[in-house]
Image (cartoon, rainbow, N blue to C red):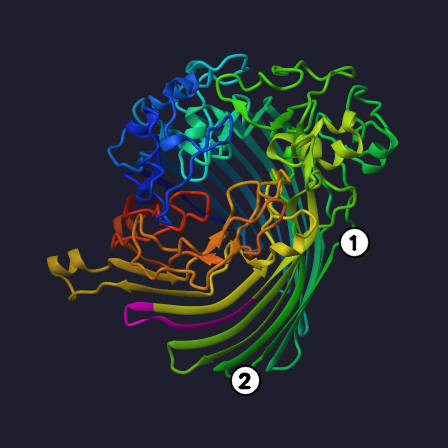
Amino acid sequence: MTSSSSSVDFKQSDIRQDPSASNAFVPTAAALGGDFSVLDGPGCQAKGVTRVVNDPTTGLPLPNNQISPTRFDPAAVALAKYLPQTLNPCGKVSYGIPVQSNESQYVGRVDWIINPKHSIYGRYLLDDYTLAAFFDPHDILVTSTSGNSERAQTFVLGYTNTINSSTVNSAHFTFGRVRNNRGPNTSGVNAAALGATNLYQGTGDFLQVAVNNGGFAVGCGTCALGIFNITSYQGADDMDVLLGKHQLAFGIDLIRTRDTQNNHYQDDGVFNFSGQYSNDPLLDFLTGKMNSFSQSGPQLNDLRQTVFGLYVQDTYHMTSKVVVNLGLRWEPMLPLYDHFNRGSTFSQAAFNAGQVSQVYVNAPVGSLFYGDPGISKSFTDKRLANFSPRLGIVYNPDGRGRTTFRAGAGLLYDSVGTFIPYRMVAQNPPFGPQVTLTNGPYQFSNPWATVPGGNPFPLPAPGKNVAFPLANAEVFLPPNIHSPNISQWNASVQHLFSDNWIFSASYLGNRTSHLWIGNEINPAVYIPGTCAGKPCSSTSNTQARRVLSLANPSAGQYYSQMTIADDGIGANYNALLTSIDHRFAHNYTFLANYTWSKCLGIAPMSSLGTGVIQNPYNVRGDYGPCTYDVPQLFNASIVYSSQFGHGGLVSHLLSNWTIAPLVRYQSGLPVNPVSGKDNSLTGVGNDRPNVIANTMYTGASHGLFYQYVNPNLYTANPTGTFGDASHNSLRGPGYFDVDLAISREFKLREWMTLRARVEAFNALNHPNFNGPVSNISASNFGQITTASDPRIMQASMKLVF
């Protein structure tokens, strides 16, 4: 006996919306004429006090906060013509980035029951998504969102064999591929088009400028041209066996992943202005005084990774009231590697001994590559002893299932994604080096003019005798990094107090260990006092004060920011979860839950791009609320199936509609206060301020441009010190949302059904405001300047046959 079924799904949506308003600060007409008296006056400062503006060259106060526009940088003046105009005396502009996207989704599935013991199924999913990139010559701020052309495909083939009445075997093979082509609008401009000279431009239409501490941004780090492809293969086999009171399960899982990229991340340069020289970021911009400048070559990788797992599990029905579950999984960490052997590591011992690589003979001492003695392709060790035990107990005291107690615990290891350490392969010289200059000021119109050795880009193809540029920003894995893991435990009680209503209360806890974060290992050392009549420590001599530069100036000049994966940190989470559930009856279901929780940790796993810790020597000092800590969370959902009458036109039109609202409320997310300037003079740039007031919030109504945080809560950390404000010690407004879905099935034929669905996200169009500006150097510190999405609607149809 054989049978089969198939279905084809199609979904298409074209969402066009004006997203929530954002705001920025651009030079006013007065500022473009050299008059900053209003822009930096009390009416434009969160604290209501005039900001002193200095001459960016001499550091002396500007008379009447005015400067001659003849001193403005030509590239900055050219860029200012692309900025939106404003009549606001403080330079404030509100803008939205248009969103034009289109998504088409196709799903096909075939099920074949060959006979009662053998069945096969296959499924194919194709999803195409495009997001347009915009460019407006009158508002270049819209370039801070990239364009994307993505295609995702998956194919699954599964086979189930019922060997006998107590043994079932299931196997499946999965193929997946995701292609993402990213890039800016081809009508855009780059720095060369603005008049910048002596500057390599790898992309003809991309510009990335950041005027921090209350300015504006053009472009973004993830807006540059790039091609990203991920291909994976998975095979798994699972066996289930009933043996008396035991239900045994065991299986194997094997995944092979390939991650390739061609990323023009910073090959047009990244121009940063902070207000470090004039105390006004917009004046620093107009005079072209950059506090830092970065540029890289195209970042390439071809990463390969294997994930392997074995498991065994026993569900033991000890008595009619007690069930015990025991399991063990083995999942070794097999580190990823680049197919073309790109990447490098750094050895402090080799640096101290003056050891040079045998693979690239002009590499700076301490840098080692695959092919050097003792260096593997993955630059870190395997972790083979990753065994994950787990235990669960279910107790039903009355034997009828009306009240059930559950408890469980387990240890799980995480498989680190290929994106996490990719910079080690793509960024480290000589493959796609990123030069980061922090000894400003650098001039916008000619960034390399004052840099020893000049502009190193474009670089030649790597060879044994290739030259290495100075001031490389590099990323490394330690040679014996641990696998991230999580210990989980829980206890719960469920009670059925009527035929359709269930109440439950659960305690949930977990602790993560060996999470990977980026930490700086080559910070600048603060040296107090004066040297030759000048401060021994300043932002203009950061590179000379870095740890490796002080230890060996000739070798240390090749290293600037150096980020290493620190696996010695973790987080913990504890929560009380209560819920009430009405099973489907009387044409409706209802589910509501409330979670009261706390998450504390140091930092989330990141892509290891730069350090995330304020003080690299005191990682524990960043312990605080997790970035996703939500102390209170409430959800309620209803699914109602309409029924009207027992026939007739009205009954036909109004019956069988499914209406499903979802209500959500959550506490505001944590916000990390920052100083906005490198007052610690470490070159890390994660300084936090000192707390000087007890009142954190103003109590003002929520809304765009409202002063949410007390503007006098903090003061800048003194030179050479770190602030005492705790990490993530501020918190943004809460979030409230109602989503709604309406759907119905239309029976076209006995064998064909059309399913229609309409969805509204934020159906009430309720404004949900994001966190406040947390940079105390910004003129709008503590103000709420952005909001989440407004109402979004989409519709889809699915044909099943």
Residue at the location (31% across, 36% down)? 38
Q: Does 249 appear above or below 347?
A: below
Category of crowding for the residue at label 1, using alpha-carbon neighbours closer than 10 angstroms: few (below 14), some (14–19), many (at least 20): few
Q: Which residues are magenta?
A: 574-589
On screen, residue 185 versus residue 678, left or right, reads: left
Q: Residue at x 39, y 25 (%)?
A: 67
The image quarter in which residue 76 lies: top left
* The C terminus sits in image quarter: top left
Q: Amino acid at mark 2?
A: Gly
Q: Which mark is residue 226?
A: none
Q: Is residue 614 left or right of residue 250?
A: left
Which residue: 37% across, 71% down? 583
Indicate which disc, 1 or 2, sits on the residue closer to the N terminus: 1
Q: Which residue is mark 1?
A: 385
- Rendering coords of residue 238 (x, y %): 65, 54
At label 2, counting other C-alpha atoms closer than 10 Å, the crowd grade (few under 14, some 14-19, many 20 or more) is few
Q: Position of residue 781 (x, y in %)?
A: 41, 47
Q: Residue at x 49, y 58 (%)?
A: 692
Which residue bears the numbered disc 2?
A: 399
Vertical placement of 279 versus 452: above or below?
A: below
Describe the element under mark 1 as helix, strand or loop: loop
